[in-house]
């Protein structure tokens, strides 16, 4: 298998490394390194950036200095791995704010004539979305229709040209039983080795 350039984007908003999302990322990174993939990591919780408040700022403002390197890492990557916990049925606000800042015109897509979205700027990249949650993942998938993950895949990642996009939903992590969660670490290690 050809080595890939992989960016692991940790979307948990708590900067402490004591959450299951962090353990999953470590397992993925271990597998990827052992398989010879090139790896970069990004912790959204460690970045300093303001939230966007106007459409004009999004369209015409500058990327905050703290996020220029993040855009460079996204441009470098062939594959993105995005991990986050489900909060109030969606990604945490800090992660959403990060994606709004980096997915700007001129980087995530480019205009042509009157169409500002004519060319998707991040084609040629794939993604893996890993979401942890307190509820059983089957409940989220079937009752709630995994609505927020589908929105992320269609309205953000797919909109800028990233494809294919695969996801992994990991439920019942609120009161973790180490024996029950260990197979997920093995799964992330295997995904890392495969560069998926």
Image (tube, helix red, strand yellow):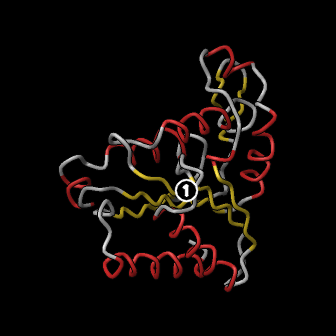
166 versus 67 height, above or below: below
Whether residue 167 sits left or right of residue 179 in the image: it is right
How many marks do you count on the picture?
Answer: 1
Q: Would you call the spot at circle 1 few (<14 residues within 10 Å), some (14-19), or many (20 or more)?
A: many
Instruction: Measuring from the top left, give residue 10's x and y in whole percent.
Output: 58, 56
Instruction: Measuring from the top left, give residue 168's x and y in whole percent.
Output: 41, 64
Quadrant the C terminus occupies: bottom right
Quadrant the N terminus occupies: bottom right
Q: Secondary structure at mark 1?
A: strand
153 versus 54 height, above or below: below
Instruction: Measuring from the top left, give residue 20's x and y in whole percent.
Output: 45, 65
Q: Which image quadrant is residue 35 in?
A: bottom right
Whether residue 1 sits left or right of residue 168 in the image: it is right
Of residues 13 and 1, the one drawn nearer to the viewer in this rendering: 13
Of residues 148 and 28, the one drawn nearer to the viewer in this rendering: 28
Residue at the image point whose x is 71% and y is 80% from the top:
2
Of residues 150 and 168, the one drawn nearer to the viewer in this rendering: 168
Whether residue 12 sits left or right of residue 124 in the image: it is left
Residue at the image point whose x is 25% and y is 48% from the top:
145
Residue at the image point whose x is 73% and y is 69% from the top:
39
Residue at the image point whose x is 77% and y is 31% from the top:
64
Q: Which residue is mark 1?
A: 82
195 versus 92 height, above or below: below
């Amino acid at each position: 298998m050809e080595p890939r350039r992989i960016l692991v984007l940790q979307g948990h908003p708590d900067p402490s490394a004591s959450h299951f999302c962090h353990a999953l990322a470590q397992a993925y990174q271990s597998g990827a390194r052992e398989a010879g993939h090139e790896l970069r990591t990004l912790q959204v919780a460690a970045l300093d950036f303001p939230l966007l408040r106007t459409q004009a700022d999004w369209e015409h403002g500058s990327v905050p200095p703290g996020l220029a390197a993040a855009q460079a890492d996204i441009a470098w990557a062939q594959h993105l791995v995005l991990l986050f916990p489900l909060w109030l049925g969606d990604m945490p606000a800090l992660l959403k704010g990060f994606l709004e800042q980096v997915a700007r015109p001129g980087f995530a897509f480019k205009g042509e004539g009157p169409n500002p979205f004519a060319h998707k700027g991040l084609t040629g990249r794939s993604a893996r979305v890993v979401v942890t949650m307190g509820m059983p993942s089957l409940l989220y998938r079937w009752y709630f229709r995994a609505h927020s993950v589908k929105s992320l895949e269609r309205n953000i990642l797919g909109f800028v040209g990233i494809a294919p996009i695969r996801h992994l939903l990991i439920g019942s992590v609120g009161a973790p039983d180490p024996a029950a969660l260990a197979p997920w670490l093995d799964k992330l290690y295997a995904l890392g080795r495969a560069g998926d």
